Amino acid sequence: MSAVDKVLDQYNSRVYKNRKEHMVDIGNNENDNQIAANVRTIPGIITQRGCCYAGCKGVVLGPIKDALQIVHGPIGCSFYAWGTRRHKGKKEEGVDNYLQYCFSTDMQEPDIVFGGEKKLKQSITEAMDLFHPSTIFICSTCPVGLIGDDIHAVAKWAENEYGIKCIAYSCEGYKGVSQSAGHHIANNQIMRYVIGEGDREVKNKFSVNLLGEYNIGGDGWETERILKRIGYEVVATFTGDSSMEDLKNAHRANLSLVQCHRSINYIAEMIEEKYGTPWMKVNFIGVKGTIGTLRKIAKFFQDEELIKRTEEVIADELGLIQDDMAYYKSKLKGKTAAIYVGGSRAHHYQFLLHDLGVNTVLAGYEFGHRDEYEGREVLPFVKPDADSKNIESITVEPDTEKYHLYLPKEELEKLKEEKVIDYYGGLVKDMPDGTFMIDDLNHFETEEFLKILKPDIFFSGIKDKFVAQKSGILSRQLHSYDYSGPYAGFRGAVNFARDVTMGIYTPAWSFVKAPWKTVPILTGTFGGE
Ligand code: CFM
Ligand code: HCA
């Protein structure tokens, strides 16, 4: 009996039928490794997913340092946005930095009953008086959508009243089925009101945007360090350690590099459509991943000097980490891992683990869509359901003035055919037969799969980490890196290898006995007969 069957067999028939479609025993199924994704979680099941507001305010907008971001909603929602996601930002001369603050309208019952727009205006006035920001974002949480406050009208009011930029995001938590809906809403507004407005000079023809890099634990800094060393100009990073001015100029780059496809593919495609800048899927996680990525970028620019410089930097960086990586590999070779996070990292980190001789036996996404699992070739076959239709999909036209191509059309077509640009292959192609791909893995399934597969390490988030550790399995958070990092690029790979080795060689795990195994946690009596 496969691990998937063992877990499914414990469900009643309705749950069984639903969850079966989200679990793939790779290579051993009648469905050609097809998976169900981006659909509602069964009510009552303890999912690890977050909400639309988390994806919009927390993930995509949060790292923009000089936009003062007001959460319009009850205070609880704001607590969750207060430094819990580890997007780092540096002080920059002439650029405001609100990253350490948390702004909320703190809606109370009367605001819910009589409407919260007045309070929102008052909060904007207060923020203007205290901080004088040039940009304000308004992000709404669940009750705002339910009572119908018009945050977009308030944003217009603020723009007229104060002469600032004010953008409203209707990212109520309940919209869509996960954080993913919030990424889309944030992408739409940034495309509409930010990108294309700048006219900063781009001096270097090897100019790139880094999309879907949020600088968690400093990953974006390590990536930019390597790119700059080779000779690229990074025009804008979306959105790690970014400023509004950076984002406004993104259309001027010659190529967009997409690290996290899930959270930013909408912007990547729209920039190409409107301004001609193509996008390329990259991966700066893992040594081989980084090297492959650097060669792919150089291939796009078709410049002998750049190709030579790329190889020089690769050789030099490798020389600096080789011994450390070999040492950690000798410690980790043959170990196994399970990875369950929100989106792209469950794919990316398999490359880094592979560098260290660690095989991934199970991987999954909280909110990846079918293309993150199976590749972009499935897009025409994905049926939009009521929840995804709920999220506005905007279209853009080529901008007659700002449209520019670095390579001629025929060259671009050729690169598209070769899948060098505009393509993402998905998780399943990099996982061997006999491993497992699980969508929206819930608490119950996590415990069951860990019991059956017994990986040496479980990469997870804050909600599932301690359940694993209390049952004696090491867990490292791949969202926050357990406050370590960076893990990207060459130097990051060594940090990661060190942290994982320290974890695995800590003897504590073999002594842990889950408290619920010795003392019953719930006691009671059955009623009735
Ligand atoms: Fe992309 Fe991210 Fe991720 Fe994501 Fe996230 Fe994140 Fe994540 Mo937490 S944008 S999909 S919505 S790589 S916050 S930086 S770690 S779930 S795997
Ligand atoms: C989010 C943010 C999160 C949560 C991490 C976790 C992050 O989706 O709301 O559950 O540990 O990376 O901070 O993914």
Image (spheres, rainbow, N blue to C red):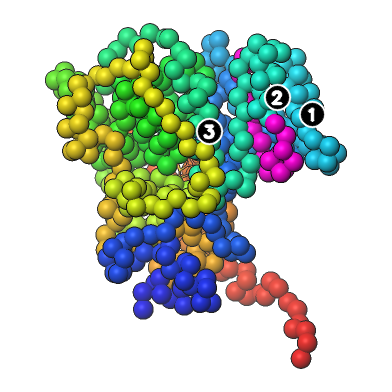
Dot 2 corresponds to which residue? 154
Mark 3 vs 1: CB contact within 8 A: no
* Badge 3 amino acid: Ala
Q: Residues within 10 Å of mark 2 (few under 14, many from 20)?
A: many
Distance CA(mark 3)–CA(mark 1) = 23 Å
Q: Residue at x 53, y 77 (%)?
A: 12
Q: Residue at x 47, y 66 (%)?
A: 19
* Horizontal and vertical percent position of residue 467: 56, 61
Distance CA(mark 1)–CA(mark 2) = 11 Å
**Residue 135 sits above or below residue 151 on the image:** above
SS assignment at label 1: helix
Q: Which residues are magenta?
A: 131-150
* Horizontal and vertical percent position of residue 290: 29, 36
Dot 3 corresponds to which residue? 186
Mark 3 vs 2: CB contact within 8 A: no
Judge whether residue 117 is colored magenta. Answer: no
Q: Residue at x 63, y 14 (%)?
A: 164
Whether residue 231 is visible here, answered yes or no, is: no
Taking the image as shown, residue 161 lies to the left or right of residue 115, namely left
Nearer-the-camera pick, 366 or 446: 366
Sequence-first tag of 3 and 2: 2
* Badge 2 amino acid: Val
